[in-house]
Image: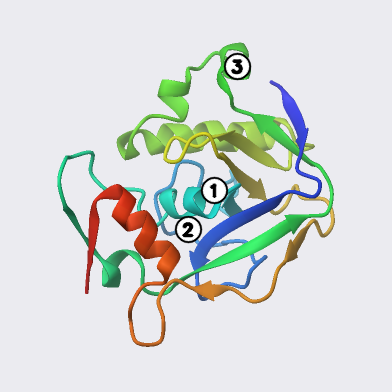
Amino acid sequence: MTILSWGKGETVYRVHSDAYGSVEFNPSSAGNARFSPLVNVAGAVIPTLYAGTTLDCALMETVFHDVPFVAGPKMWSKATHVAGKAWSQLTLSRDLALVDLSAVPLRKLGISRKDLIECDGSQYPETRAWGLALHDQYPNAEGLTWTSRQADPARAIVLFEDNLKGSVLIPSGLPTPLLLSDGSARLEILMLAQRLGVLLTP
């Protein structure tokens, strides 16, 4: 297992429920993500925070994560995928200690990128088991990092609240809702949707 020291001064973005503040970790047991929710042996959820090194990465890992790989226009419901979400811009005040899930360290761990990072949702119970094992076996690791499958070459990270040492995340203002007050999507959402061939519907 390789621990990467990374992030001092870097800006990262997270897309999250507007019920949470910019640096508030997600404590919910709901959802079905690659490395969350993580539930420990006592049955308690380990709060996590996902982020990416670009806003496009954060959006691709959340709002547009399940856009199908098909040619031509793809309909995408704002009510289902965009409403109730916001993005936050954060600066890291110091380096983070992150488990490196890039190709060479993964080979050292004995699992391929295809099986851990590039697999689909049907294998998420297995990838969450890996995430929990890494969290439990390496308490000095504050999270995981990998090259985003959804928006390479951006870096994705997930942080473990219970392993994070001190205040590291400095927000730049308040969270930004993905939808404007009239229900239309912000320009950043529209531009990425256009690149994906996605038509946003109500």
Residue at (41, 81) in percent of width and height: 180
Q: Tell me, yes or no, whether the two marked residues, 1 and 2, touch with CB atoms within 8 Å.
A: yes
**Tag 2 residue:** 29
What is the crowding at mark 2: few (fewer than 14 residues within 10 Å), some, or many (at least 20)?
some
Q: Which residue corresponds to the image point at 40% horizontal and 87% vertical from the top-left? A: 181
Question: Furthest-bottom residue in view?
Answer: 182
> Rounded to the nearest whole Å, what is the CA distance between mark 2 and mark 3?
27 Å
Q: Nearer the viewer, residue 191 or 84?
A: 191
Q: Is residue 56 above or below residue 98?
A: below
Q: Is residue 32 above or below residue 108?
A: below
x and y, in percent, of residue 172 in the image:
70, 69
Q: Residue at x 29, y 69 (%)?
A: 78
Say if 126 sits above or below 66 in the image.
Answer: above
Q: CA distance from mark 1 to mark 3?
A: 22 Å
Quickly name the residue at label 1: 39
Percent coordinates x, y for residue 57 in the rendering: 49, 48
In the rendered structure, find residue 109 and report the number of the disc placed on it: 3
Residue 192, by quadrant, is bottom left
Spot occupied by residue 28 in the image (x, y as percentages of width and height): 51, 62
Q: Quadrant of residue 186?
A: bottom left
